[in-house]
Amino acid sequence: MTDCVIYTRVSSKEQEEGFSLEAQLDLLRKYALDNDLRIAQEHVEVESAKAPGRPVFDKMLDYLKVNPETILLVEKTDRLVRNLKDHITIEDLGISIHFVKEGTQYGPGAKSGDKFMQGIRVLMARQYIDNLGEEITKGMTKRAEAGKWSCTVPYGYRTNPETRSLEIVPEEAEAIRWLFDTYATGDYSLRQLCAEFRTKGFPWRYAKPLYPTRAHKMLNNPIYKGIIKWGDIVVRGEHEPIVATALWDKVQANIHQRSRPKASKHEFAYRGLIRCGHCGCLMTGSINKGHRYYKCSNARGKCNGNKYVREDVLTGTFTGHLQKISLPDTDRQLIVSAIKDFKRAEVDERDKERARVSKTATRLQTMVDTTYDDYLAGNIDRDTWQRAHQRHSEKLDQAKARIQRLDSGDASLYDHAERLINTAVSASEEFETGKPAKKRSILKAIVSNCTLTSGNLHHNYKKPFDIIAEGFNTSNWWSVSDSNRQPPACKAGALPLS
Ligand SMILES: [Zn+2]
C-alpha cells in the first residue's frame, strides 16, 4: 500500500466567509480510500496569502524530503503553490502530487502535457495572489477617500496610536517650514538647499542625509498643505497642514521654473527608463553624428561607469530579452484554450458554490424570522430570542458576504491572463518595429528596474512575464514535445492511479 500525505489550506479571510477546510479534507480522504492509499499524515494550514511563511507547509516539506515515495494529495493547485518559488521547491522534491479536484497528477513521469498545464496553474495561482494585492490597494483607496493617510508616514508627522491618524511632530514640522520658506526665496538650488539644511541640525529620521531627490519629493508633497493624494484621488486630509497653501504654491512655481525641461526636438525611446548601474542616475539621450546615444546624467557627481551607448544597440538587447517571452503561436493557442477551460471549470464551480451558499442563506433567513415569530408569540423570552437572532444573523452576514464575493468573482482574471499571453506573443516584434512611444509603452508594461552597468543591460520582468521568461530558461515547462498535445479536461473528480 502506498503512503500519501494530505495538505489542505485556507486563508483566514476565506475561513471567515465559511470556506470550508472540512470539505477539502473529506474530498482528499475519500480519494485516498478509493485509490488504496494509506494516509500517513494530514496537514492543515490556515493562513493569509500575503503573509510570509507557511509553517505547516514547511513541516510537510521536511517530511516529504525524507519520505520521497509518499504521494501528496491536494485539492487544487492554488491550495499548494502560491508562486514560482513554491513550485520550484515542490518540483525539487521530486515527489508525485495528485491534484484531486483538477484531476491531474504531477511529478516524475508526469506527462509533458500535465507538466505544461501545471505551469499554467502556477501562473493562475500567482495571478490570484496579485489580485489579493489589488484588494489591499482598494482598501487604501477607500482610506484616502476618507482623508486618511495609509502609506509610509511622511517626515513631519507621526501616527497617533489611538486615532490612527497623522499628527504633527513639532521639531520636524519646523524643519519642513524652514525648507519651504528657504526654497521659496528662489535663491537656492535643491543642492544648495540640502547642503544648508544639513548644517542646521534639524532632527532627521532617515539613514541617508537629505539629498536633492528627497528634498524635491518633500517640496512636492501636498500632504504639507493638508492635501492627500492617492492615485487620482485628491482630498483634504483630516490631518493638520504644516505650511500655508500660498507658500506651497510659491515653492511649486520655483521648482517648475528651475526644472523646466529643455524643449527637445528629438524623441528618445528610453529617456527616463534606464538607470546607470554605477551611480543610480538616469541615463539621458543625445545625438551625435546622426546616432542616438545614452549616457549617465552625472546628476550625483561625475560618473565614469558607462561609456556612451547607442540606442540601436539597446533596442537590439531589449528585443532579445522580449523574445524570451514570445511564445510560438501554437503554444499561445494551447495556453489560451487551456485558460478558457479553466475559466469554464471555475465558473461551473462558482455556480455550484453560489447555489449552495444561497440555500444556506435562505435557511438562515428563515431561522431569523422564525425565532422572531416565536418571540412575538411568547414561545421564547427576549434574551433567548436576542441570542438566537445574533447567532443566526452573524452566519447570515457571512453567507451574504460569501455570495457577494462569488458574484464579484474574478473570471476577469482569466481574461486578464489571456490578454497578458497575447501581449507576450507579439511584444518583441512590435517592439522592434514600433515607434519610440510604442517601444516605451511595451517596456513599461513588461520590464522594470532597467540598469546599465559597464554597457550591460539588466532588468526584471514584471509579473507574470517573469514566469514565462523563467519557464523557458529553467525547466522548459511550457514546451510540450508530444505531437498530440491536448490540455487535459479540467473536471472535478480524480483520474485512476496508473
Ligand atoms: Zn553613472
Image (cartoon, helix red, strand yellow):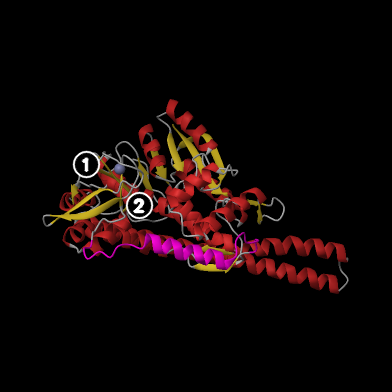
Give coordinates of residue 9: x percent, y percent: 53, 45
Which sits earlier in the primary sequence, circle 1 or circle 2? 1
| Helix, strand or loop for disc 1 | loop
**In the rendering, which numbered label is found on residue 464?**
2
| Alpha-carbon span between mark 1 and mark 2 | 27 Å
The mark found on residue 455 in the picture is 1
Of badges 1 and 2, nearer the viewer stands: 1
Residue 247 is situated, as x and y percent measured from the top left of the image, at 55, 64
Q: Quadrant of residue 402?
A: bottom right
What type is the residue that disc 2 sits on?
Answer: Pro
Depth check, front residue: 417 or 191: 191
Q: Secondary structure at mark 2?
A: loop
* 475 displayed left or right of 38: left
Residue 407 seen by the camera: no
Q: Amino acid at mark 1?
A: Gly
Residue 468 place in picture, x, y as percent:
29, 49
Query: In which of the image's four quarters is ligand 1 placed?
Result: top left
Magenta stretch encompasses residue 258: yes
Left or right of 466? Residue 134 is: right
Closer-to-camera residue (379/338): 338
Based on the picture, tell me whether residue 166 belongs to the magenta stretch: no
Q: Is residue 444 visible?
A: yes
The residue carrying pointer 2 sits among few (fewer than 14), some (14 to 19) or many (20 or more) residues within 10 Å by Cα, namely some
The quadrant the C terminus occupies is top left
Highlighted magenta segment, given as a residue range: 238-267
Within-10-Å neighbours for mark 1: few <14, some 14–19, many 20+: some
Assess whether mark 2 and mark 1 are in contact (beta carbons under 8 angstroms): no
Residue in the image at 60% along x and 52% along y? 15
